[in-house]
Image: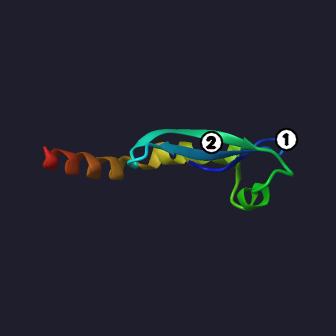
Amino acid sequence: MYVIRLGDGTLRVPQSLTSDDGRLIGNAYVEVAPGEPEYERWAAESITEEEAARRRSRWLAENDELEREFLAFKADQE
């Protein structure tokens, strides 16, 4: 998940919620507006919505070898 910078400057920052014993409950985005605490820290690593879409498309197009390796690994575990 990436920190995504929207057109108006608002950031969508990924956040995970875990249980007391460390199990993942869910992932979501929280919005951080310019001027809010932590904005500058997150803005430094943010990407635009368009860049996020390009990365997602590239990953889908180029992950065939990794997917084959994972499926082979998974088959060995069963």
Label 1 crowd bin: few (<14), some (14–19), many (20+), radius 10 Å: few
**Residue 54 lies in quadrant:** top right
Label 2 crowd bin: few (<14), some (14–19), many (20+), radius 10 Å: few
Looking at the picture, which amino acid does disc 1 mark?
Answer: Asp
Which of the two marks, 2 or 1, is nearer to us in this view? Answer: 1
Element on which disc 1 rests? loop
Q: Position of residue 32 (x, y in %)?
A: 75, 45
Residue at 70% across / 54% down in the picture?
46
Residue 75 horizontal side relative to residue 57, left or right:
left
Q: Position of residue 10 (x, y in %)?
A: 79, 44
Q: Position of residue 74 (x, y in %)?
A: 21, 46
Residue on which the image places disc 1? 8
Residue at 66% across / 50% down in the picture?
3
Mark sitting earlier along the chain (2/1): 1
The image quadrant where one finds the C terminus is: top left
Residue on which the image places disc 2? 53
Element on which disc 2 rests? helix
Looking at the picture, which amino acid does disc 2 mark?
Answer: Ala
Residue 1 horizontal side relative to residue 72, left or right:
right
**Direction front: furthest residue:** 20
Residue at 33% across / 47% down in the picture?
67
Residue 36 horizontal side relative to residue 54, left or right:
right
Along the line of sight, which residue is nearer the eye, 8 or 66? 8
Q: How is the image coloured?
A: rainbow
Q: CA distance from mark 2 to mark 1?
A: 18 Å
Q: Which mark is residue 45?
A: none
**Disc 2 to disc 1: CB gap under 8 Å:** no
